[in-house]
């Protein structure tokens, strides 16, 4: 359990139990601003206090600014890591803090991965001299990856208690079936009645798709079923399950078991077919003025100009909220139900080719799509790029070193087209010299 108190002083302090989500954080920020008379404050609120089962951890957290998404992601990850530790590992972690005296959140997290460099002899914990520091956070993607592959689901369950919250780390399936005590603790036999945050596990992506009327015991039975399967391709199985959930909309766990038992992914390793659809990107850049503020007027950018911003664009797409909540992308947007069951995922991305930055929709399916089916996918993607998800992306500024970029996967230009990768590259489509925004067949 890890709770933090954020604010600027005693009067406006707000408690958060970790892991938490943006909605809860924004609610706390709102209460802090309300206490301060809605005055704009230049700095982020900071951690004033903390509660943890690691007795000396709070002193290493106090004073950090609490920002979104950086500090929120790091602290959520730290809370999940601590909950995953055994009682013995928590003792070692506490002593490791005294020995190493980490000065950043990154170092605190890395310490949880480096507990094997300490040893306990006769009740004394010391650091091994021959062990090297494991810099696991050199790759920032670690925050987006779940851990705990020896369980189906790894959860944080919260209940309100006193000034903050108390939380319980729950692994499913449970080795010791203690549901009577657990249901008394949470005061409910259903996960939907309490705050539950999914943190990991081999099948963690399925958690948010389970029926709301499911009980703890039913989900535990399902978790046991999942772990008993000899999956040749777990990634395919999970994608199949999500597609089935979105298409069939199961009403109870009995429906979930029926869907899971009938999936090919549980017994057969399938070949995945992939096709990529390319379309030209365009954007509008609003630069900073001399005072560091965004100018009111922007200027248009073509695909060739967008190459310099491709890393910033890639990072935004990887962390875009809607896509993170929908790992299969736009599959659920397909109107044809049979096509929806055939397609595994439809995810947008970008790629540089022939001196331009292109919008790409990567489509994965169980079978090769027929021309008519591909036409339906292209039609759906055109609508999403123009007025659905694409509209949200256009209105979401992408911060760059020189200003704010508004990216568009769609254009009203008459020459705008969506092409397969083969059509684009094999036919050598090039940018017209006379029409800088158009495409012609070379």
Image: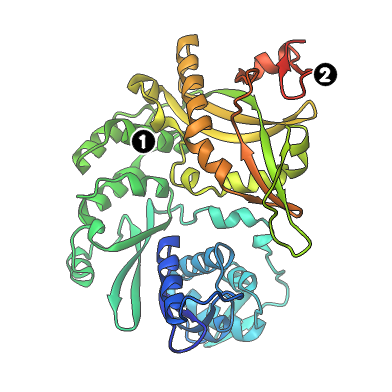
Image position, residue 325 (x, y; %) = 44, 46
- Location of mark 1 (residue): 241
Image position, residue 282 (x, y; %) = 67, 33
- Residue 429 relative to residue 32: left or right: right
**Distance (Cα) linking label 2 and label 1:** 48 Å
Query: In this rendering, does residue 206 appear at all?
Result: yes
Image position, residue 257 (x, y; %) = 25, 38
Label drawn at residue 77: none
For residue 379, above or below residue 114: above
Image position, residue 45 (x, y; %) = 54, 77
For residue 158, above or below residue 441: below
Numbered disc 2: secondary structure: loop
Q: Residue at coordinates 76% horizontally, 53% vertically from top-left?
A: 402
Q: What quarter of the picture does the N terminus occupy?
A: bottom left
**First in sequence: mark 2 vs mark 1:** 1
Nearer to the camera, 270 or 418: 418
Q: Residue at coordinates 37% horizontally, 54% vertically from top-left?
A: 153
Q: State the image quarter where residue 366 is shown.
A: top left
For residue 419, above or below residue 80: above
């Amino acid at each position: 359990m890890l709770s933090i108190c954020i604010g600027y002083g005693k009067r406006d302090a707000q408690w958060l139990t970790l892991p938490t989500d943006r909605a809860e954080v924004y609610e706390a920020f709102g209460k802090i601003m309300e206490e301060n008379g809605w005055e704009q404050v230049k700095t982020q609120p900071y951690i004033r206090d903390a509660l943890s089962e690691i007795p000396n951890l709070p002193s290493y957290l106090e004073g950090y600014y609490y920002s979104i998404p950086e500090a929120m992601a790091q602290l959520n990850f730290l809370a999940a890591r601590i909950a995953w530790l055994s009682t013995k590992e928590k003792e070692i972690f506490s002593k490791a803090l005294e020995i190493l005296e980490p000065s950043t959140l990154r170092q605190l997290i890395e310490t949880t991965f480096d507990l094997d460099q300490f040893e306990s002899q006769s009740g004394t914990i010391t650091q091994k001299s021959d062990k090297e520091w494991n810099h696991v956070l050199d790759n920032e993607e670690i925050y987006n990856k779940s851990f705990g592959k020896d369980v189906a689901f790894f959860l944080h369950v919260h209940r309100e208690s006193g000034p903050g919250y108390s939380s319980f780390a729950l692994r499913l399936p449970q080795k010791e079936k203690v549901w009577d005590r657990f249901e008394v603790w949470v005061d409910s036999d259903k996960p939907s009645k309490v705050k539950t945050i999914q943190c990991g596990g081999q099948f963690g992506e399925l958690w948010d798709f389970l029926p709301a009327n499911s009980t703890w015991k039913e989900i535990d039975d399902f978790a046991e079923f999942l772990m008993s399967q000899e999956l040749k391709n777990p990634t395919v199985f999970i994608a199949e399950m999500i597609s089935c959930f979105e298409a069939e909309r199961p009403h109870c766990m009995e429906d979930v078991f029926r869907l899971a038992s009938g999936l090919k992914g549980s017994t057969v390793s399938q070949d995945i077919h992939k096709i990529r659809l390319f379309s030209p990107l365009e954007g509008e850049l609003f630069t900073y003025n001399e005072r560091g503020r965004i100018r009111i007027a922007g200027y248009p950018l073509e695909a060739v100009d967008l190459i310099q911003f491709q890393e910033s664009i890639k990072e935004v797409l990887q962390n875009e909220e809607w896509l993170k909540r929908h790992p299969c992308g736009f599959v659920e947007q397909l109107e044809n139900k049979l096509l929806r069951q055939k397609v595994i995922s439809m995810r947008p991305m970008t790629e540089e080719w022939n001196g331009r930055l292109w919008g790409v929709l990567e489509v994965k399916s169980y079978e090769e799509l027929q021309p008519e089916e591909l036409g339906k996918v292209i039609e759906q993607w055109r609508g999403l790029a123009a007025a659905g998800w694409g509209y949200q992306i256009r209105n979401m500024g992408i911060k760059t070193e020189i200003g704010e970029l508004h990216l568009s996967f769609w254009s009203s230009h008459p020459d705008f087209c969506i092409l397969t990768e083969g059509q684009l590259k094999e036919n050598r489509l090039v940018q017209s010299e006379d029409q800088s925004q158009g495409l012609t067949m070379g």
